[in-house]
Image (cartoon, grey):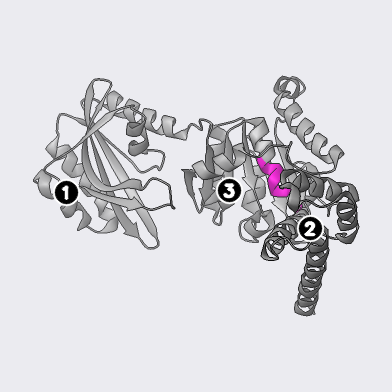
Amino acid sequence: MDIENFIREALHKPNDYIGYHVGRELAELHPDKAIIEGRTSYFDLNAFVRDGRCSVVEQKSVFHHVTMDWEGSGRKLKQEIQNSWLNVLWKGQLLDVVFITWVEGYYTRRHHWIVADDRQTAECFFDAVCEWNCEVRGEILVFQDGYFEKDQQLLDSIKQTTFDNLVLPPTLKQQIQDDFQRFFNSREVYEQYGIPWKRGAIFIGPPGNGKTHTLKALINQLDKPCIYVRGFGAEEEIAALFIRARMVTPCLIVLEDLDSMVTNKNRAFFLNELDGFRSTSGIVVLATTNHPEKLDTAILERPSRFDRKYYFDLPAEAERLAYLEKWNQELQPELRMTGAGAAAAVIATEGFSFAYLKELVVSSMVQWISSDGNVSMDDVISGQTELLHSQMNTKKEKKKRQNQ
């Protein structure tokens, strides 16, 4: 087979024959070389090259199929090799790397082949690329539907979130910080007494009361490798998640809205990963739920799985006052409430979550600007509070009718 048509000819073969075909043809083209095949997503050659770990030259006689993904305004286009033949220079060794991608049913398969002078060189290069990509170096790994990616925007958001700008009952805020810092500082004690060095915690409460903010502040403070899970379904995806976590321990796994992720189909497998035979030493699983009643008691009640539960209730008067005062201090003088106005707002906002308090402040600012500043902020806050109460009551009535 001529090298110019190598990839095209391979892609014309049946899916279950492509791997064998490529391996055999490479062996015929390079009878004196060592060839190994892989198909792991950890073999991200692009990232390895960007970090200066090796250099790559395209094989000019082969057409290179590369796709570009747009991931949002202000972010770099993401390039991904689909089908290509590359010449790689690594530690003074010249290797060939072939990528071939095809679709099987609903899944995309991408295999790679490494051609080197000897098997040890090929295996060492394979291992070096995968090991480097597996490391989490001050980044946030996002896991969704079986795939991992590093999310710089999420990392930036977390780095800006601290406990200093979080309003919670002081006891709860301090307890959360102390519990996890003490856990990560106590590995030797756990091991000395034969106690599994792992932790599961779940934040429980209605939406808008600080669970996500607390998660981000905790991740920022602990400064440990973190895998943020946006979703999983099949057992294979759950297995991949915990395999990766075991590679980067000690680490955090974050599962927001746990009740929407764990289903009847994957519950048993998920629970087995949490406390089955495989080690979870050094893994902290942080979960949140707005609907604890939807969680199976095997998740919520068994201590070895989520042995810490933190309740995020609607803010009491003290927290509502602290929240409104915090906002007040950050506003320009003409937009601020008076002391009496803030006190009245605290009383009037009973039943508001932090999310509704934020909406109250923001909508009041917009309303004040629309009135050209001819109405006091105290009066604007009072009117917007009544409006939001009305909206909340409407939502409650609608939900009540839906549940009947």
Amino acid type at image mark 3: Val
Q: Residue at x 77, y 47 (%)?
A: 328
- Looking at the rendering, the stretch of residues picked out in magenta corresponds to 209-216
Secondary structure beneath disc 2? Answer: helix
Q: CA distance from mark 1 to mark 3?
A: 37 Å
> What is the x, y in percent for residue 175?
82, 35
Number of marks in the rendered image:
3
Which of the two marks, 2 or 1, is nearer to us in this view?
2
Q: Sequence order check: which comes first, mark 2 or mark 1?
A: 1
Image quarter of residue 292: bottom right
Residue 251 lies left or right of residue 331; in this view the side is: left
Q: Which mark is residue 229?
A: 3
> What is the x, y in percent for residue 286?
69, 43
Q: Which residue is mark 2?
A: 377
Whether residue 242 is visible here, answered yes or no, is no
Give the camera-side residue of 6 and 183: 183
Q: Is residue 309 above or below residue 221?
A: below
Give the camera-side residue of 229 and 365: 365
Residue 122 lies left or right of residue 296; in this view the side is: left
Residue 215 counted in the magenta span: yes
Residue density around tag 2, few if under 14, some if 14–19, many if 20 or more, within 10 Å: many
Q: Which mark is residue 63?
A: 1
